[in-house]
Amino acid sequence: MLEFGMATIYFDGEAVGYVQGGSVDFSFDKATLYDGNKKFPSDVRTHTGSISGSGSFAQLRAEAFYKILGGTLMDINETHRLTITSADAPPEIALQFEVTLDNKTFRITLPKVISGNLSLEFARDGYVIPDFNFEAFANSEDIVAYVDFVGATDPIS
């Protein structure tokens, strides 16, 4: 799991919201082969992978809320109303997570993401900070993620 300072939510190439405290999980499922009564596997194969994560909104606009949940956004007088019908589904968005240390930037861009949930905790003693989770999928170019090391001559150092 990677922890980041900030992330940007993009919809159709436009930044529509900001996330704080985001995390990205790269997971792989594996199959192991054991020979006879041996205790350790003799072969391991990766057969599926996933990229998922979560975050909390740092800035919440009605448009960003809509991009996570889906539905139809309408302006009624001075009220922004999001109407969600039984046929609505969350749209695809893109997320870009970034952290900069010592003038070196580590960035993960997920070009096709769908949110699995959005939770709102209404408490009397704090602020309502929406949390959401997501899962990344391959885009039309079969790319699931871009990982950039900006300003580093050796990405490992």
Image (spheres, grey):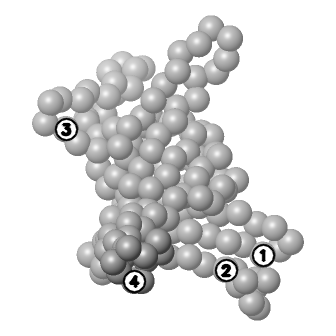
Measured Cα–Cα span from mark 4 to mark 3: 44 Å
Query: Counting residues from the N terminus, which is met first, the one under dot 4 or under dot 3?
Result: 4
User: In the displayed image of the protein, which residue is found farthest to the right?
Assistant: 102
Position of residue 64 relative to residue 112, above or below, is above
Spot occupied by residue 141 in the image (x, y as percentages of width and height): 30, 81
Q: Which kind of residue does numbered mark 2 sit on?
A: Phe
**What residue sits right under mark 4 in the picture?**
43
Q: Residues within 10 Å of mark 1 (few under 14, many from 20)?
A: some
Q: Quadrant of the N terminus?
A: bottom right
Is there CB contact under 8 Å for labels 1 and 2? yes
**What residue sits right under mark 3 in the picture?**
88
Query: Counting residues from the N terminus, which is met first, the one under dot 2 or under dot 3?
Result: 3
**Rendering quarter of residue 96:** bottom right
Measured Cα–Cα span from mark 4 to mark 2: 33 Å
- Which numbered tag is attached to residue 104? 1
Query: Counting residues from the N terminus, which is met first, the one under dot 3 or under dot 1?
Result: 3
Measured Cα–Cα span from mark 2 to mark 3: 37 Å
Count of marks placed on residues:
4
**What residue sits right under mark 2 in the picture?**
149
Measured Cα–Cα span from mark 3 to mark 1: 41 Å
**Rendering quarter of residue 128:** top right
Query: Counting residues from the N terminus, which is met first, the one under dot 1 or under dot 4?
Result: 4
Front disc: 1 or 4? 4
Q: Residue drawn at (29%, 40%), measured in percent from left and top?
A: 70
Query: Counting residues from the N terminus, which is met first, the one under dot 4 or under dot 2?
Result: 4
Q: Which kind of residue does numbered mark 4 sit on?
A: Asp
Front disc: 2 or 3? 2
- Secondary-structure class at tag 1: strand
